[in-house]
Image (cartoon, grey):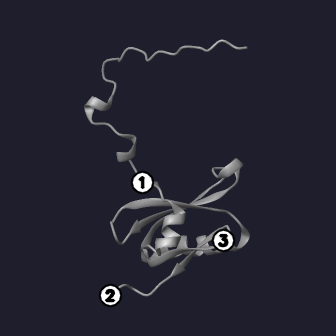
Amino acid sequence: MAKSRRTTIPQQRAGSVNNSDGFSFGEHGAGYAQKNEYATKGLIFDIEEVKYEEGAGFDGADRWAVSVRRHDSKEVEIVTLGSNEKRDEQMQAALDYIETHGLVKNVTLKKSGRAYFFENVKAPK
């Protein structure tokens, strides 16, 4: 039986940041979207940025990280989707569009079986 190892928090160094300074990891950058929530609630969003991330997915798989801005809250979150041939073509087309025209507007996330995919919707009135 292995002995449990006790860890201690090191003394705070000058210039380090702690919670009393108002720091929160959640306040810096976009968080990850709850894909099931997006799909089941039919949330509408705009795609702001598309990035291909080699080896950054589950078990080191390649993936796409898509920054989206929700219409209902204006919150920016990241939707990640695994890489495959069809999705790679779609995401590259979206990336090209964003570089040329700006946002991909009025998009929703759908689910079919275990797979998620993006779909354009009519602009809300």
| Residue 38 numbered mark, or none | none
Question: Residue 27: x percent and y percent?
Answer: 35, 46
Please tell me which residue lies in front, 32 or 91. 32
Q: Quadrant of residue 94?
A: bottom right
> For the residue carrying disc 3, how many other residues have a C-alpha within 10 Å: few (<14), some (14-19), or many (20+)?
some
Please tell me which residue lies in front, 25 or 14. 25
Q: Quadrant of residue 118?
A: bottom right
- Disc 3 designates what residue? 87
Tell me the quarter of the image containing the N terminus: top right
- Disc 2 designates what residue? 125
- Number of the front mark, 1 or 2: 2
Side of 54 where 99 appears, left or right: left
- Whether the residues at callouts 1 and 2 have beta carbons within 8 Å, the answer is no
Name which residue lies at 64% across and 52% down. Answer: 57
| Residue 30 numbered mark, or none | 1
Question: Residue 55: x percent and y percent?
Answer: 67, 50
